[in-house]
Image (cartoon, rainbow, N blue to C red):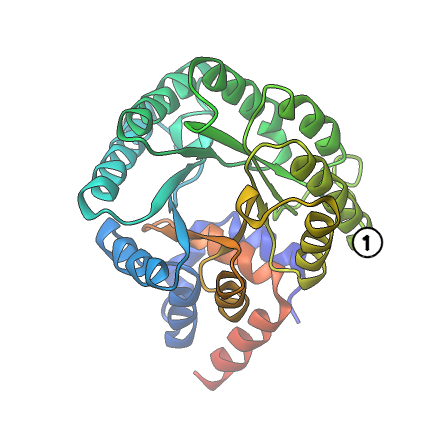
Amino acid sequence: MISRSALIWLSRHEGLKDFATRFGYFKKLTTRFVAGETIDDAVSHIRAINAENCTASFDHLNESVASESEAEAEVTEYLNILARITETQIRSNVSIKLTQFGLGLDPELTYRNARRVVEEAHKRGNFVRVDMEDSSVTQATIDIFKRLRAEYGLNDVGIVLQSYLRRTYADAQELVKLPARIRICKGAYHEPPEVALPDKKDVDANYVKVMQLLLSSGTYHGIATHDPKMIDATIDFAQREGIGKEKFEFQMLFGIRRDLQRQLARDGFNMRIYVPYGKHWYPYFMRRLAERPANIWFVMKNLVKG
C-alpha cells in the first residue's frame, strides 16, 4: 500500500498527471472527486447538489501560479464564476486559494487580486472563503484576510483554519473577536511535527476544541468534516448549548460521504458541498487519495487490472 506521505509527495509533481490519466480507472475515479474541467461542468453538478437541499462552494483548482499573468487569469476565472452564479441562480459561494492570486510572487499583488474578487462578490451579494494551504503561507493568508475583513462585511469574506496545526486554537481565538466567519477542517498537507500535531487523536481533540469555540461565538461558521465522530461531537455540543441548526453549517467535499451529506440535509442541518473543478486537478486529487486509504486500494487494484 502506498503511504500517505508518498501520495503527498506525488501530489507535488503534476507532471505525473499525464502518465496517471492513461489508466482508465484512475481517470474514472477523478470524476468522483472533481466536478470536471470547466465552469459549466461545475454548474451542472451544483444544480444537482441544490436539488438535494444543499448549497455549494465553487473552487477553481490551480495552485502556486508562477506569473502575474497566470494570477490575472485566476481573477478573471473567479469574476466569471460569480457572474455565472448570478446568471444561473444556483446556491453557491466561492473558495479561493491565495497562491492562485500570486502569493508566491508578491503578497501585495495577491491582496489586490483577492480584493477584486471580494469586491465583486460584495456587489453581487455573494461570499468569498479564503482557503488555507500549507503552513508556509498560514500567516500571510491570515494577514491578507484581516485586511479584506477590515474593508468588507462579515458576510462578504471568511477564512479557513486547520485543526492539525498547533497554532490554530490561538488563531481561532483571535479571529472570532473580529468577528470572522471561519471554516474549521482537519488539514490535508504534509507538515513537520513541530508545526502540526502528528497523532490523529490530538488533531481530533483540537478540532472539537475549536468547533466549540466557534459555535459559542454566535457567528455563522462552517464545520467541515467527513468524520462521524466530529459530526456527532458538533451536534451533541449544539444541542447541549441550545445552538440551533440554523446557526452553523456542515461542509463536505464533492464526492466524499455523499450518503452522509444527504442524511444531514434531510435531518435539517445546513449542508454545503465544496465543488472543485479545473484542468489542474491532479494535486488536489492526490491529497484526497492520501486522506482515504480505501480510495488508494481501489486505484491500485484497478491499475493492476489495466
Instruction: Pick the residue in front: 18 or 206.
Output: 206
Q: Position of residue 74 (x, y in %)?
A: 31, 34
Q: State which quarter of the image contains the C terminus.
A: bottom left
Q: Position of residue 115 (x, y in %)?
A: 37, 20
Callout 1: few (<14), some (14-19), or many (20+) C-alpha neighbours within 10 Å? few
Q: Report whether 289 appears left or right of 126.
A: right
Residue identifier under label 1: 201
Q: Residue at x 26, y 59 (%)?
A: 44
Is 266 rendered above or below residue 275?
below
Instruction: Pick the residue in front: 269 or 161.
Output: 269
Q: Residue at x 61, y 65 (%)?
A: 292
Tell me which amino acid carries mark 1: Lys
Q: State which quarter of the image contains the N terminus.
A: bottom right
- Extreme residue in the bottom direction: 305
- Extreme residue in the left direction: 87
Instruction: Pick the residue in front: 99 or 272.
Output: 272
Is 303 rendered above or below residue 123?
below
Q: Residue at x 44, y 62 (%)?
A: 33
Q: Residue at x 49, y 13 (%)?
A: 150
- Which quadrant of the figure has residue 175? top right
Q: Position of residue 135 (x, y in %)?
A: 64, 33
Q: Report whether 85 appears left or right of 224.
A: left
